[in-house]
Image (tube, rainbow, N blue to C red):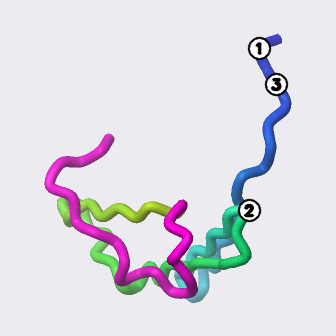
Amino acid sequence: KGFGTYDTEYRTAANCTTKRYFFELSDSPSVIWVDLKKFDLKRGAPVRILDPDNINLLGDVSSKFKKVAKTPF
C-alpha cells in the first residue's frame, strides 16, 4: 500500500579501488564520472554541487562542481 511503479531514471556505479563514481541518466547517451581523489572530503571542507541534468556534461566532471555558500541540506 502506498507504493507505485516508477521508471529507472539513472544508473550509478562506483569503483572503490580507483575512487571513481559513474553516473548515467537513462535518457542521455553520455556517461559522466567523478574522480573522488580530486576532492577534499575532510570534515568542514566546502560543499560542492553539480547538476547531473545538465546535458552538456560528458566524461570526467570533477572540475565542474561549484562551491556553495549555503549547504543545500
Query: Badges 2 and 3: C-beta atoms under 8 Å apart?
Result: no
- Spatial CA distance of label 2 from label 1 is 27 Å
Looking at the rendered structure, the kind of residue marked 3 is Gly
Image quadrant where one finds the N terminus: top right
Is residue 71 in the magenta section?
yes
Q: Nearer the viewer, mark 2 or mark 3?
A: 2
Looking at the rendered structure, the kind of residue marked 1 is Gly
Residue at 57% from the left image edge and 74% from the top image edge: 21
Above or below, 4 against 22 in this view is: above
Q: Residues within 10 Å of mark 1 (few under 14, many from 20)?
A: few
Looking at the rendered structure, the kind of residue marked 2 is Asp
Is residue 48 in the magenta section?
no
Q: Which mark is residue 27?
A: 2
Q: Please identify the quarter of the rendering in which residue 15 is found.
A: bottom right
> Residue 31, image x and y in percent?
66, 78
Residue sitting at the far top: 1
Residue located beneath label 1 in the image: 2
- Spatial CA distance of label 2 from label 3 is 21 Å
Q: Nearer the viewer, mark 2 or mark 1?
A: 2
Residue located beneath label 3 in the image: 4
Nearest the viewer among 47 and 42 is 47
> Residue 42, image x and y in percent?
26, 68
Residue at 37% from the left image edge and 78% from the top image edge: 64
Helix, strand or loop: magenta stretch:
loop
Point out the stretch of residues depicted in magenta: 53-73
